Amino acid sequence: MNKNNNDWCIEEQRLKETLQEASLQLDDAMKANEKNREMIREAKKEIRENTSHGIGSLWGSDGFEALVELSQAMAPVTERTALYEFTETKIAKLRGILDTPYFARIDFCFSEGGHTEPIYIGHHSLKKENAYKMLIHDWRSPVASVFYRYAPGDAWYDAPVGRIEGKLLLKRQFEIKDGHLDFFFDADLQVFDDFLKKLLSSNTSPKMKTIVESIQRDQDLVIRDMENDLLIVQGVAGSGKTSIALHRAAYLMYQGLSDRLQGREIIIVSPHKLFEQYIANVIPELGEENVRTVIFDDILKDLINRKFETKNIFLERILSNGPQSQLKNDSMAFKGSADFIKILDRFIDDIPRHFMNIRDIRFKDETIFTRAEIISRLCTNPDTPMKTKLGYLEEAINETVYGKWRRPLKSLVRNEMMRFAEIDALNLYQQLFETKGYFFKAAAGIKLPATIDKMLAVTKRNLAHKNLNYDDAVALAYLSFRLFGAKEYASIKQVIIDESQDYYPLHYEILNRLFLKSKLTILGDINQTLQKNEDISFYEAIAKRLNRKKSALVTMNKSYRCTSEILRFSKKFINDAIPVESFNRSGEEPILLGAADTESLVEKVCEVVCQCEKAGYQSIGLILKTQKNTMVLYEALKQKITVNLIRHDTMAEIEGVSIMPVYLSKGLEFDAVLLCDISAANYHSEADKRLLYIACTRALHRLYLLWEGNPSPLLTD
C-alpha cells in the first residue's frame, strides 16, 4: 500500500478524527467516575455518621423504622454505584477503541435516496458527542452484516424499519494496532481468503479469541438468526462452531437491548470445565458480561444434590477397556434412551399408587379425603412436580377441615400428610429396581438390552451402597425434577449447548423441561461422538424431543483449523456421510513414528517437542486415549521437559506443552499435536476411529502419531 496516495491520507485523517473523539469521551468518562467515586465515599460516610439507628437496633422494637431509614439512606449509594459500574464498562470499551477502533469499512449506496455512506465497523460503536454521526458501527449492527455476507455488488440487510437494499461499492479491511494504521486492503473473495489464511497460519493462544474480523457468511447467518426458537448447527471439526456460539451469545445480548435480554438470562452448556476456562475471555472481549456457563454435571448437582460419578470419570472408565467397560457403556446407552424415559414416566405415574403409603385422611372418625381421591389428585397434571401437587393437596385438606369445623387444624393435617408426603428421590429410584417384578412390569412392550439382567444387578449393588454411576445420576436428576421441580434456571431465555452429539435423549428431556420456554441453539458434530454412533437423524430426534414452534438445521462443512494435509489424513477415520471440506491452507504431512519400547517412545516424544518449540510453536498438545495412559507418560516426561498435566479438574490455561486424555481435548486446538499412544492395543475399534479423528483435528499446523510396539491397524485401514 502506497502511504502517499489519496486513499491512505483519507484513512489516516478518519482514524485521527475517530481517536480524538474516543479520547475526549474517555477523559469525560474518567472524570465522571472520579466524581462518582467521591460521591459514593461521602454518602457512605454520611450513613455511618448520621443514620440514627445502628445495625444492632434493627432487631429491636423500632427495627422496622430503622430498616426503612437505612434503606432510604442506601438508595443514593446503590444508584450511584450502578452508574459507576456502567461508566467503568464504557471506559473499558473506549480504551479498546483507542487501541483498535475498527477493522473494516464498507461503502453502501442506498437504493432509496441514492446516497452513499462510508460505514466503519468495529468491536464497539462510537457516536460523536452532541451530533448524530456514527463514527463506528458495532459488528453486531444490522448494516455490518453486509460486510460479512457480500462481495461488491447488490446487497441488502434487515433493519428495525424493514429491509434496506442497495449496492456494496467498497469492502475494505484494516490492520490497526495501538491506534496506528499499519495497512489496509480492498477485499474481493480471493484477497479475503488470503487474509484469512494469514490469520489461520499464526500460532494459537492459551485462550480462545474473538473472530469478529474474519466471520464467514455461513457463520454470520447462524450468529444473527432470530427467527428460530430452535437452531441446530451440524459443524465439522474446525468449522468455528464454538466461536459462533459465543459470538451468538454476544449478538443476542446486543439485540436484547430492545427486549431487555440480559447476560444472566443466557446460559451456555459446555462439555467440560477446562473448555469452560478456555472460552472464558471471548464474551468479555466482545464487551458483554454475566453470561453463565455450566457443564451438564453442574445441572446434575443442582437437581440431585449428592455425590455422583462425573462425566469425565465415566468416560475414563469406558475408554480404559476394563472388564466392565462395555457393560458400563451399554448401560448408559439404555438408561439415556427414549425407552428408559418411558419406563421412568410409567414409574412416576405409579408412585402415588404403589410407593407412597397413602391412606384415607380422617378427623373425628370422619373421612375427609379417601385414598382414591388423594391418588387421583396426585396423578393429574403430570407436568406439575409432585411436591407442588402435595402442597395443593394440603391446602385443599385444610380448606375442607376449616369448612367443617370452622377452625384451622394445620398441624393435624400436616401430621396426617407426613405419613406419605415426605418423598426421597434416591429411595424411590432404588425401589424402581428393588421392588420384585416391578421393573419388568414398567418395561412392558419395550425391547430390553440382552445384558439387562447384568445391568440391573450392577445398578442394585451400586444403589444399595449409595453409589451413583453417571447413568444413574442422569436418571435420578430427571426423577428429581419430576418430583420437586427446579427454580435455579427459571429466568433463562436463551440456551446454547455445545458438543451436543455426546448427549442422550434423557439429557435432552431434562434440558427441555428445565428450559421449557427458552430458545435454544444446539451445536455439534456427529463425527465427534464419544462411544456412541450417530447419523444425521440424531438432530431430527433432538428437534422432535425439544418440540419448539420453529426450528432449523444448518450444516457447516468447511474446516478452517487444520491444514489440508492434516484434514485429509484425519478424514480416513470417518465415513463420508457428512462431507468435510478444507479451507485449503497447505502445510506439512502428518508424521508417523514407532518405538520399540517405552524408553524409546519417551525419547521420541521429547525430540519432537523440542523440534516444535524450535519451529516457534507456542502451544503443543500431547494427547492420549485415557487419563491412565496420560499419567504414565507424564511421569516419564516430567524430569525431561516442562509439561503441564491436564486432568478433569484442571482450570489452567492451555499454553506451552500440555498432556491430556483425548476426551479433555474436545473443543481445544494446538499449534502442534502429538498422539502418543497409537498402538494396536489402544486403538482398534470403530469407536476408536472417532477418537483418532477428534485428536487429529486438534492440530493447526503439525501432527505427529507415535506408538510403542505394534501400530494401530486403523492407521492403515
Image (cartoon, rainbow, N blue to C red):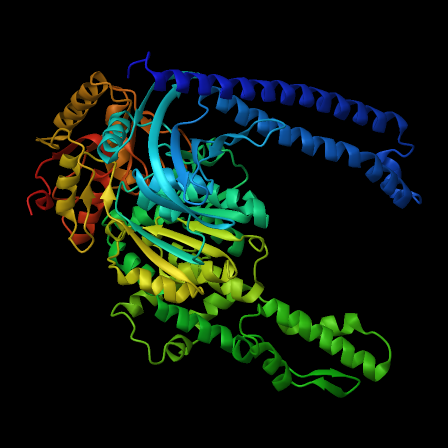
Query: Which residue is at the far left?
Result: 716
* Rendered image quadrant of residue 88: top right
Q: What x and y, as percent, mark residue 638?
A: 28, 23
The answer to whether 406 is drawn above or below residue 264 in the figure is below
Which x, y percent locates residue 160? 51, 49
Task: State left or right for residue 654 relative to residue 423.
Answer: left
Which quarter of the image is occupied by the N terminus? top left
Foreground residue among 55 and 588: 588
Q: Nearer the viewer, residue 340 or 534?
A: 534
**Residue at position x 30%, y 72% in the image:** 448
The answer to whether 445 appears left or right of 326 in the picture is right
Number of disc labels = 0
Residue at the front extreme, as displayed: 113
The residue sitting at 29% across, 57% down in the picture is: 329
Q: Is residue 687 among the parts visible in the rendering? A: yes
- On the question of residue 241 being in view, the answer is no
Say left or right for 612 vs 129. Answer: left
Where residue 710 appears, as percent x and y from the top left, is 8, 39
Q: In the picture, residue 535 is in which quadrant? A: bottom left
- Give the x, y percent position of residue 193: 24, 33
- Residue that protrudes farthest toward the bottom in the picture: 366
Q: Which of 608 and 364 is in front in this view?
A: 608
